[in-house]
């Protein structure tokens, strides 16, 4: 699958869609973003993000009263794309640094860290 990169804001919308795993309206997305990330977006702003995501083939929509949006790209597929993009940019040696930083951010124990290696 050939994916394109997402902006931070587009990724935030996708994360909400992936987490809920059900079609969402713009109002539901606005509420979730406010609750989870303490960011207040206007309806027009979220529609703009969704249009860009549709143009990049990340979401689809249908209208039943309000428009409902669903991801067309699986979260796991995007994470693999993101990891490959980071590796291509930072170089082959960056993967160990990234994993160590991720493990520290997650407060992994020594045993959990050894299991990852």
Image: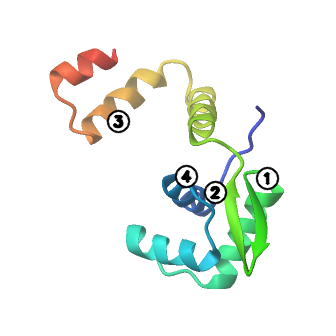
Mark 3 → mark 1, Cα distance in angstroms: 28 Å
> Residue shown at 58%/80% (left/top)?
27
Task: Indicate which label's residue lies in the foreground, 3 or 1.
Answer: 1
Disc 1 on helix, strand or loop?
A: loop
* Label number found at residue 7: 2
Q: Nearer the viewer, mark 3 or mark 4?
A: 4
Please tell me how many numbered marks the rendered image carries.
4
Q: Position of residue 3 (x, y in %)?
A: 74, 39
| Among numbered discs 3 and 4, the one appearing first in the sequence | 4
| Earlier residue among tags 1 and 2 | 2
Tell me if mark 4 has few (under 14), some (14-19) or many (20+) residues whose alpha carbon lies within 10 angstroms of its own: some
Q: CA distance from mark 3 to mark 4?
A: 21 Å
Looking at the rendered structure, the secondary structure element under dot 3 is helix
Determine the secondary structure under disc 4. Answer: helix
46 left or right, relative to 39: right
Q: Which mark is residue 56?
A: 1
Q: Which residue is mark 4?
A: 18
């Amino acid at each position: 699958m050939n994916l394109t990169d997402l902006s931070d804001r587009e990724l935030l919308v996708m994360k909400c869609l992936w987490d809920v795993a059900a079609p969402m309206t713009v109002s539901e997305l606005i509420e979730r973003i406010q609750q989870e990330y303490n960011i207040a977006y206007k309806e027009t702003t979220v529609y703009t993000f969704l249009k860009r995501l549709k143009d990049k083939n990340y979401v689809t929509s249908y209208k039943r009263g309000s428009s409902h949006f669903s991801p067309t790209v699986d979260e796991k597929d995007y994470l693999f794309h993101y990891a490959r993009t980071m590796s291509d940019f930072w170089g082959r040696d960056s993967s160990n640094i990234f994993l160590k930083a991720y493990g520290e951010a997650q407060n992994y124990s020594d045993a959990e860290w050894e299991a990852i290696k």
